[in-house]
Amino acid sequence: MHKKSDSMLIKKLLSIRDEMLDRCTRDEITTLWSSWFEGKGVHEPYEWFRPRGERRFWAKYVWKDYVPPKYSFITWLALQGCLSTRDRLHFLENLDPACQLCRWEEESADHLFFKRPKTWAVWGKIMLWLGIARRSTTIRSVIKWAGRQIRGSYIVQMAKRIALMASVAIIWRTRNKVIFGGKTWDAVRVIFEIKEATYNILYSHFPHEQVLLHLPDR
Ligand SMILES: [Zn+2]
């Protein structure tokens, strides 16, 4: 009798589950749910799901029609601190928390994406190419800064947005290939892949000469 509304409810619950799994680990979700059920009313869960403040700002920056969803998605997870770097996997017994790429320190998002000299070298080249003089040390600060920049041509604005997110996604993908696929970290290759991905998208929107005029391959 209530079949239609039941299926609507199930759909809604599934989408809530997916959103939560996107943002957090299972343990964190269990803790959140129990705190909500002990609390009164819907205020807390509502606040959690409502994008506002920084999250609203990130959402506006990250989700763009010309940015491939796989780049937006990884950047989105990184911004929320939900990528499964080893510092967040302490509940797994016998897991070595060290960064598997250099073994100098515990693997955190800040370490993996910025503090490692080999990743720092990638950003250095990418920032130079994009004409960005500022050196950020976290993904949040780089996105916050880039989102406020309104100077430069439309092509350059677009290139920055694509390249910053492609960098996050490609660095993450390369990290996974090193850990799970036995590959080695090749900074030149990573830089090439970021530039290639960015140019391919720009070329699908503008003539090649115009793209290279605004964003020379340096
Ligand atoms: Zn490392």
Image (cartoon, grey):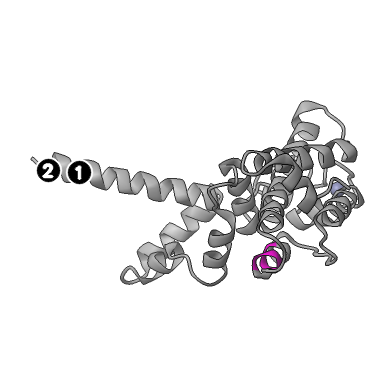
At numbered mark 1, what does the secondary structure look like: helix, strand or loop?
helix
Residue 152: give x, y in percent of width and height: 72, 64
| Residue 142 among magenta residues | no
- Magenta: main secondary structure equals helix
Q: Amino acid at mark 2?
A: His
CA distance separating discs 1 and 2: 6 Å
Query: Of 184 and 89, which appears nearest the observer?
Result: 184
Q: Amino acid at mark 1?
A: Asp
- Residue 208 in the image: above or below residue 123: above
Q: Kindly identify the residue that appears in the image at 45 percent across and 45 percent down.
A: 18
Residue 65: give x, y in percent of width and height: 53, 48
- The quadrant where residue 81 appears: bottom right
* Residue bounds of the magenta highlight: 143-147
Q: Which mark is residue 6?
A: 1
Decide: marks 1, 2 in contact (CB < 8 A)? yes
**Disc 2 packing (10 Å; few <14; some 14–19; many ≥20):** few
Residue 110: give x, y in percent of width and height: 77, 57
Query: Of 121 and 153, which appears nearest the observer?
Result: 153
Whether residue 171 is visible to the viewer of this picture, yes or no, is: no
**Which residue position holds label 2?**
2
Query: Of 168 and 96, which appears nearest the observer?
Result: 168
Whether residue 32 is visible to the viewer of this picture, yes or no, is: yes
